[in-house]
Image (cartoon, rainbow, N blue to C red):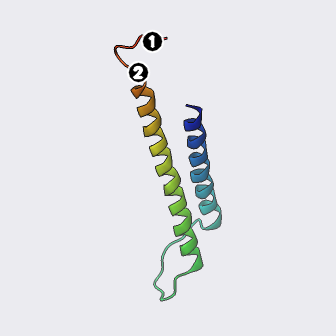
Amino acid sequence: MRAYLRLLLLFALTAGAAYLASRLLVPNAVPADSEQPQWYLQLAFVLRSIELIGLGGIVLVLVAGLAAWFGGRSPTKPVR
């Protein structure tokens, strides 16, 4: 269970760092009509992608941890 908590913390820190970086570096990134993509929009997109990857990792770790926790319990096995 310790490995699950470490992974959960790692993904939470990744998502949190990307969220804070996006709020500090590109707080009001709004696409405008232009033919060339602006650097701040590209940065906002990358940071948002990293944030969503971190949040997805949190969900996967929680699902795997709960499955392992509940899968280890059996109705026929005595609880110690």
Q: Position of residue 76 (x, y in %)?
A: 34, 13
**Towards the viewer: 24 or 7:** 7
Image quadrant holding the N terminus, namely: top right
* Callout 1 secondary element: loop
Label pair 1/2, CB-CB below 8 angstroms: yes
* Sequence-earlier tag: 1 or 2: 2
The mark found on residue 73 in the picture is 2
**Towards the viewer: 64 or 28:** 64
Q: Position of residue 45 (x, y in %)?
A: 52, 68
The mark found on residue 69 in the picture is none
Alpha carbons under labels 1 and 2: distance apart: 8 Å
Single out the residue that lies furthest toward the front.
Answer: 77
Q: Residue at horizontal 42%, vertical 10%?
A: 78
**Towards the viewer: 64 or 59:** 64
Q: Residues within 10 Å of mark 1 (few under 14, many from 20)?
A: few
* Callout 2 secondary element: loop
Q: Residues within 10 Å of mark 2 (few under 14, many from 20)?
A: few
**Towards the viewer: 75 or 26:** 75
Q: Residue at horizontal 55%, vertical 37%?
A: 4
What amino acid type should be assigned to the residue bearing mark 1? Val
Single out the residue that lies furthest toward the left.
Answer: 75
The residue tagged 1 is 79
Vertical placement of residue 29 versus 59, above or below = below
Q: Residue at horizontal 56%, vertical 81%?
A: 38
Q: Position of residue 57 (x, y in %)?
A: 49, 49
What amino acid type should be assigned to the residue bearing mark 2? Arg
